[in-house]
Amino acid sequence: MGKYNTEEEALQNYDSKKYRTPDGYTSDIAIFTIISEDMAPYKPPNKILKLMLIQRAQTNAEGELNIEGGKWALPGGFINENETAYEAAVRELQEETGVEGLKIKHFGTYDKPGRDKRGWIISNAHYAIVQESKLAKRKAADDAAKVELFDLHEVEKLKLAFDHEDIINDAIWNIKKDMALTTIAKDFLPKEFVLSELRGVLSTVLDEPWLKIESQFYRKAPSLPFIDKVTLNGELKKTNKYSKKEAQLYQFNDYQPFVSIYNANY
Amino acid sequence: MGKYNTEEEALQNYDSKKYRTPDGYTSDIAIFTIISEDMAPYKPPNKILKLMLIQRAQTNAEGELNIEGGKWALPGGFINENETAYEAAVRELQEETGVEGLKIKHFGTYDKPGRDKRGWIISNAHYAIVQESKLAKRKAADDAAKVELFDLHEVEKLKLAFDHEDIINDAIWNIKKDMALTTIAKDFLPKEFVLSELRGVLSTVLDEPWLKIESQFYRKAPSLPFIDKVTLNGELKKTNKYSKKEAQLYQFNDYQPFVSIYNANY
DNA sequence: TTAATAATTAACAATTTGTTAATTAAAATA
DNA sequence: TATTTTAATTAACAAATTGTTAATTATTAA
């Protein structure tokens, strides 16, 4: 027979100090945006994937030297007891950039011993997709000296804090995977878009022959089951935003594509 | 000028108690196996996906009432300061089942406030794939009263501890996704297998027409780029293990298939 | 008026599907 | 021994989809 007869008694006696517990629980966010460079009128703009990073301040609000000060890092912060890592990421995205209601996804946990000199600190990594326009009102937060958007090849050259180089590489890998396997492309696009815009977004991360060869993409795309031609009272809705001839507008529908390696095209 | 002039000084002064920290950091593992039921000689066996669960003991080693005692749960335990969640999962898999060197994958973090009555306890969820034969030597561990393999539809009826129902549903969803998109089927198969075995493994979790319709699967499968026909000094290697007529043996190669929803077959 | 441009359609051979049927080899049965 | 049964494998063929090249369609710019 045990010392405690009810779960209540056992709970009251539970000692969380029996095990060594983490010194911190944090959320980091890789914030991606795709910027459009207008090359010429009546031409689809160049699209480039960018990652938002902050430069950690040398000193904190109290004037103390900051850990990993001066290095570039993913925005993020400590998780509160009454929220999940995901909720903290949403909150921090709002705090860091002032934007909300965006696509955000947890993709990994980083807990390698020694990753943070301050102690046993666990990071939950998320990526977020933000429309370029919304990032305009971004502002430097408490700990951030600077906020900047980087090309992915520029990121490689930066001095990054903690294990953020690993996290960023995983984030990029995850966004590529999701771009190929899910309809997240829609989070980088306006509600109604033309095929060249869709191709531009996909091309920022994917490098497959069916995408690179224009004619192949344009022949297959109109019959993809998860996008529809936009109609306006029975008429096909078209636009001249990027071309002289009118181009058909498309929008994503609710179809959830499911693919497999066993019936794919190779 | 800050109070500290070097990072060393700042670090020494860093107070991990400034933030509320978690009360525990754990790893849980959904251990899957596929059991083969021989239906008749010269017939491919029925394959069924099973999940290994433990029944939490009513009392612990000290005779105290156990939290969530009597309920079924995923095996798992506390993570040590000097290891990652993944390493803890590997260690615990070894402790629980005595097996090692298996496919194991982290698929989620569970940290909803209130998920564990003992406090702010975070779980990192993994799934593992274990050959049925290796599970034979499984044994009940410290906290476990019983260890059992369950069909997925049996699991739904069990009283599960903590938020393990959510974790298990996510584990099943992840194993389906990975079965469709990666070559993990190989972890459920012998090194050399016949097409009916491969189809049996895929069918335990997938329910697509190209798989259900026998003739379609058998016509397409031989040309999949990630499996090869096994040869033995120039000759095709065949077997009679499940059929009267000899069947071709196949093995996975290193080809990493990459699929996308934009050039899939619908 | 003409050239240039991006979107779109057309055309067609090559390949891949979906489907049904035939063939093969060994075991089980009569 | 002859016949039937079974699972694997091949064959056959129409339908659909690809890969590829070329033509067509509105515009704008020259």
Image: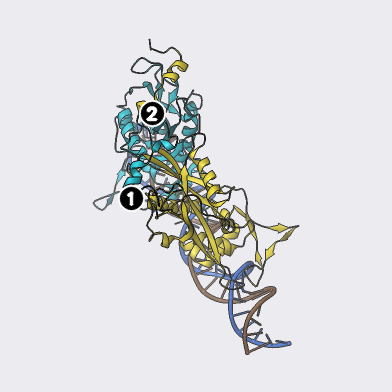
Chain colours: A cyan, B yellow, C brown, D blue
Q: Which residue is mark 1?
A: A6
Query: Is B229 on the left-hand or right-hand side of B132?
Result: right
List x then y, in percent, for residue A251.
Answer: 33, 47
Q: Is residue A13 visible?
A: yes
Residue at image coords 68%, 58%: B230
| Mark 1 belongs to chain | A
| Crowd band around label 2 with a 10 angstrom C-alpha radius: few (<14), some (14–19), many (20+) | many
- Residue B152, quarter of picture: bottom left
SS at mark 2? Answer: loop
| Crowd band around label 1 with a 10 angstrom C-alpha radius: few (<14), some (14–19), many (20+) | few
Residue at image coords 53%, 52%: B129
Q: Amino acid at mark 1?
A: Thr
Q: Which residue is mark 2?
A: A75
Choose mark 2 or mark 1, whichever is in front.
Answer: 1
List x then y, in percent, for residue B7.
Answer: 46, 17
Q: Amino acid at mark 2?
A: Pro
Q: Is residue A204 visible?
A: no
Residue that protrudes farthest toward the right in the picture: B233
| Mark 2 belongs to chain | A
List x then y, in percent, for residue A147.
Answer: 37, 23
Residue at image coords 49%, 65%: B212
Query: Is A151 on the left-hand or right-hand side of A100?
Result: right
Q: Nearer the viewer, residue B58 or A102?
A: B58
For the N terminus of chain B, the image quarter is top left
Q: Nearer the viewer, residue B112 or A89?
A: B112
Residue that protrudes farthest toward the left in the picture: A233
Q: Nearer the viewer, residue B190 or B154?
A: B154
List x then y, in percent, for residue A211.
Answer: 48, 43
Say how many tags the image has.
Answer: 2
